[in-house]
Image (cartoon, helix red, strand yellow):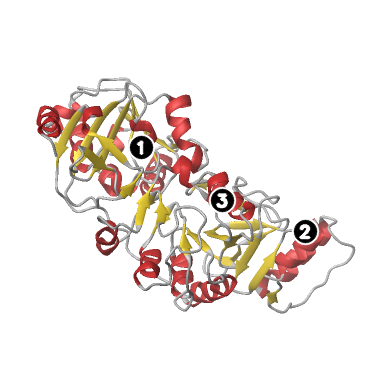
Amino acid sequence: MTMIHQTLYRERLTSAEGAVAMIPSGTKVAMPLAAGQPPAILAAFAERARAGAVKDVRLYYLLCTGVAGTSVFDFELRDVIVPMSYFHGGVERALDKRRLAEALPAVDLIPCHFSQVPRSLVEHVGVDTLIATVSPMDADGNFSLGASTDYALTVSRKPGIRLILEVNANMPYVRGDCMIPVSSVTALVENNVSLPVLPAAARNQVDDAIGAIIAGLVEDGDCLQMGIGALPDAVCSGLSRHRRLGIHTEMMTPGLATLVKTGVVDNSCKQTHVGRSIFTFALGDQALYDFLNNNPAIEAYPVDYVNNPFVIAQNNRVVSVNATLQIDLSGACNSEFMNGRQFSATGGQVDFVRGAYASRGGRSIIACHSTAAKGTLSRIVPTLTGPVTTSRTDTHIVVTEYGWANLKGKSVAERARALIALAHPNFREELDRAAYGAGLYAETAVGPREMNTEH
């Protein structure tokens, strides 16, 4: 790096306390999701709020981790630093439980497709500050956003943005369009701590059964997008014998990384970024972060590029795999609302449902267990109990442990019959009668159905 870069770095370097002192009351702050959330800055900001030195701050983000949950989102600071969530997780659900007990409103949510979050933050919300964790500065005077390019890169390029970065040697240096030049930074804080990790979700026989069905729908040369959780992990495990797969995904996971390491993924059949795996954020174990670091076969790009359905569709045979909480008998999916409360959010599901289906030979897969609550509730239901995440006009292939169904080209009545065949046998008669009662068909067809294996 040049002397100019070194000088700029030293001029901007300060303590976490000195950095957050630059954030005034009434500020609209954005932070990246997951591993990009800066622990030292967040801890210092929380202390500043407790001391009464700042108030009326709104903090915008997706997928909060414990570093924010135990600092700025301390329940006692709720009126000082207000969480403005685009995607709920465990932190918000815990806060909602506490708020409900004290008759307070739930944590607020901004409904938004993941691909549209950058525009939402810059144009509609008008954030004026970005705080983020980055890798150490490279020879060209740039910091890589590493595991969390997401919406942070777009926000960092907003004219006049107050840009406060936490430099962490443990943040992987990732190539692609994910760099912030030192010349644009307001303040720098150094803090070398471990990144948050996401333990592997426990898989069971149902997960493995669904994973095997989905893996059977994937062909050599397909381009993959995987969501988060046990089901996508099971799919990755089922792909070990495939070859020449590609990756264009919003989230890079340990399962996808394993496919690259073992040669299942080589990105040779893609039409864009040939030879490169593309993602916008990563969350997993330390082995995943080590895999990403300075890896020429991996590139990160902002989410308004990665999740843009038009960009997704430029690759042929994109296969997207995402989970849902409920599917109604017409194919509409509720993937974000449970037990009367916001559970997660839309995220990038619809981005990839539409992008994958628009790609030549592409397939969009929505998967779920047939039941919930230890088998007492059916996930296939007559009517959703929450908002529609993926509309019935967008849903393509649905998978449960009982098989799969392609809903495209099917009437509402045909969809109902196909989906009931994917339900747990204990609920099929009830669902059949509900469909009949709704006038979807003239007579019921009560009784167990064979596993759906249509093509």
Q: Measured from the top left, where is residue 250 in percent x and y? A: 44, 51
Q: Earlier in the sequence, mark 1 or mark 2?
A: 1
Q: Is residue 82 visible?
A: no
Q: What is the three-letter code of the residue carrying label 2?
A: Gly
**In the depicted structure, whether residue 125 falls above or below residue 214:** above
Residues at marks 1 and 2, CA–CA distance in whole angstroms:
40 Å
Query: Which element carries disc 3, helix, strand or loop?
Result: loop
Residue assigned mark 2: 409
Residue assigned mark 3: 314
Mark 3 burial class by Cα count in 10 Å: few <14, some 14-19, many 20+? some
Q: What is the three-letter code of the residue carrying label 3?
A: Gln
Residue depicted at x 24% and y 40%:
143
Res. 293 image quadrant: bottom left
Q: Earlier in the sequence, mark 3 or mark 1?
A: 1
Residue 234: mark in rendering: none
Residue assigned mark 1: 153
**In the depicted structure, whether residue 255 falls above or below residue 10:** below
Query: Which element carries disc 1, helix, strand or loop?
Result: helix
Residues at marks 3 and 2, CA–CA distance in whole angstroms:
23 Å
Q: Measured from the top left, where is residue 373 in percent x and y? A: 52, 64
